Amino acid sequence: MPLDQQNIDDWELDEHGRPQPPEEKEMSFIDHLEELRWHVMKSLIAISIAGVGLFLFREWYFRNILFGTNYDDFPSYKFFCWLSGKLGTGEVLCMTGPNVPIQATEFGEQFITAVKMSFVGGFVIAFPYVFYQVWSFIRPGLYKEEQQATRGVIFVCSLLFFIGIAFGYFVIAPFGTNFLMGFEVGGAVNQPKMGSMISFMIMFTLPAALIFELPVLVHFLARFGLVTAEGMRKYRKHSFIGILVMASLLTPPDVVTQVLIAVPLYFLYELSVFVAKRAEKKYQASLE
């Protein structure tokens, strides 16, 4: 920093009488809290700006995003029907939206839900900036080698987060919606409430976003010798069974749809093995 930007009155004299800048002191607990407060405030401002934008366009947001799988014009329905024809499976993957009326049965439910979901959507939109603020608070406390091991983590985590959201929204959500809305028992009629529809949409998307962060988690663990590529290869069969079980839980009891979910998840596992191998080499080099 240039001298004209520093307060030289705070400088101390060395043994030769020359002024020296004061040594940096460790931040106190209160200083850390103050730093954290500013990062949280910046994150909340970003979420609020995105949330207000969604609230202003709430009609489009609810009709096309949150309730999108309820209608025939949802893009995944046309895509999977086209894919079914290309695979020669007839109309196995062809679906249409349930097109059922969505109810709001409580006083003020529509307004409260609109506000709440606007800020949930705002968090998703502002995720890269929010993660940047979190990482800016954590990073100074890491060792130099740990900081080097986490280069590009903001970009990679944000990219995988959005890929996971898209996978859950365009793949898992349409199959889940069709199965749950088409399942009937005892002659009951499906007329979902507003909150119930949104809760399941969140369940279909946010867990997928977390699952897609697996390569990042594996990178960190392998970078510090806690996971090895060889160990992941050794338990590949066990992982494959776990992926099939997860696919069966995330999708309707249909083999075709379970395969469509399992294949990307298995690819994600193989990508994690590749990531672990590269991170393991860096870990071994750091020990030499």
Image (cartoon, rainbow, N blue to C red):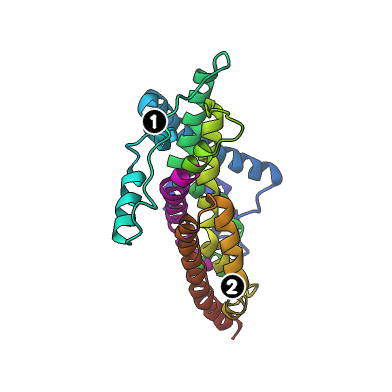
Indicate the amino acid at tag 2: Ala
In space, the residues marked 1 and 2 are separated at their CA atoms by 40 Å
| Numbered disc total | 2
Residue drawn at x 59%, y 74% as measured from the top left: 237
Residue 158 counted in the magenta span: yes
> Which region of the structure is painted magenta?
149-176
Cβ atoms at labels 1 and 2 below 8 Å apart: no
**Above or below 65: residue 219:** below
Furthest-top residue in view?
Answer: 107
* Callout 2: SS: helix
Q: Nearer the viewer, mark 1 or mark 2?
A: 1
Q: Nearer the viewer, residue 287 or 29?
A: 287
Indicate the amino acid at tag 1: Tyr
Residue drawn at x 54%, y 27% as measured from the top left: 189
The quadrant holding residue 140 is bottom right
Query: Of label 1 and label 2, which has the lower sequence position?
Result: 1
Furthest-right residue in view?
Answer: 29
Estimate how packed mark 1 is, as few (under 14), some (14 to 19) or many (20 or more) residues with alpha carbons within 10 Å: some
Q: Main secondary structure of the magenta part?
A: helix
Residue drawn at x 59%, y 43% as measured from the top left: 35
Query: How far from the left and from the top, in percent, is residue 92?
Result: 39, 53
Residue 151 appears in the figure: no
Mark number, residue 222: 2
Residue drawn at x 63%, y 71% as measured from the top left: 238
Query: How far from the left and from the top, in percent, is residue 73?
Result: 32, 37
**Residue that mark 1 sits on:** 61
